[in-house]
Image: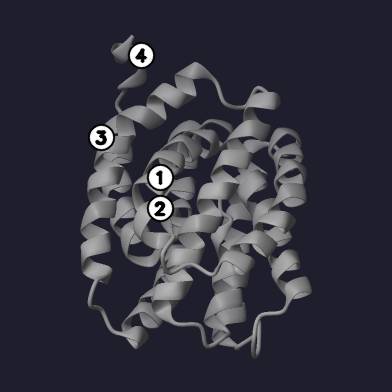
Amino acid sequence: MLNGLIDSAFPIAAAMAIVAGLVRGFAGFGSAMLLVPSLSALYGPQVAIPMLGVMELAVGGQLLPKAAKSAEPHTVGYLSAGALLGIPLGAVLLVLVPAEPMRWAISTLILVAVGLLVFGVGRKGPARRNGTVLTGGLSGLTAGATGMGGPPVVIYFLAGTDAAASIRATLICFFLFTTVWQGTVYIANDLLTWEIAARGALLYPGFALGAVAGSRLFTGSKEQTYRRVALVLVAAVAVVSVLV
């Protein structure tokens, strides 16, 4: 059975999983923005996105205990409420849109996110309930359709004045919720199979080790360091995703 799962693309996928785990552990996001373009090129979006969900669920549970202490419960709740509707709509797009246009859509979404961040478009001032729910809905839509729910939420937070520890913790809690809901929707639509889950499980150990290393890097890092890394991460992924 493993012979069918471990193919010539597996070493590349495993290496990318380690790097993505490192980013996920440090920033609380970014693994999908790294892995979806590369895994989609190797396996196709309809395999890559549910496979990433399996990995995200496991590593989200791994990071949750510490993150829960610093997260903003109301913000997590409002974001999650929006994602409840957005994820099923995104899953419909995943089923209907062919692989190649989906890859270009992934790249475009990241580039738009980078442009918005560079020009300072996003949340100004304290978070408001309606804006947070809408952001959660947009994140859910992009997560369901492309596996990348990060850009809308990252823009929302980086445009404000929230502390880095709070941003990271809130993202970890929110993305764990969306991963659970996303997986439920994928199973209901026959997008997540045992074979896809097994592929994700094989990539998880490297992903988890990277996340542990990333968490240690975050501990003690400066506020501005986190924000700069987050911005550079989104910009770098925008370039890479176009070239993949």
- Do labels 4 and 3 touch, CB within 8 Å? no
Residue 207 has which mark?
none
Q: Label 4 is placed on what type of residue?
A: Gly
Q: Label 1 is placed on what type of residue?
A: Gly
SS class of the residue under badge 4?
A: helix
The picture places residue 40, in percent across and down from the top left corner, at 49, 40
The residue that label 4 is drawn on is 4
In terms of depth relative to the viewer, which is nearer, 61 or 142? 61
Residue 64 has which mark?
2
Q: Dot 3, crowdedness within 10 Å: few (<14), some or many (≥20)?
A: few
Q: Dot 4, crowdedness within 10 Å: few (<14), some or many (≥20)?
A: few
Q: Nearer the N terminus, badge 3 or badge 1?
A: 3
Q: Quadrant of residue 180?
A: top right
Q: Label 3 is placed on what type of residue?
A: Pro
Q: Dot 2, crowdedness within 10 Å: few (<14), some or many (≥20)?
A: some
State the residue at coordinates (25%, 41%).
206
The residue that label 3 is drawn on is 11
Q: CA distance from mark 2 to mark 4?
A: 33 Å
The picture places residue 78, in percent across and down from the top left corner, at 69, 63
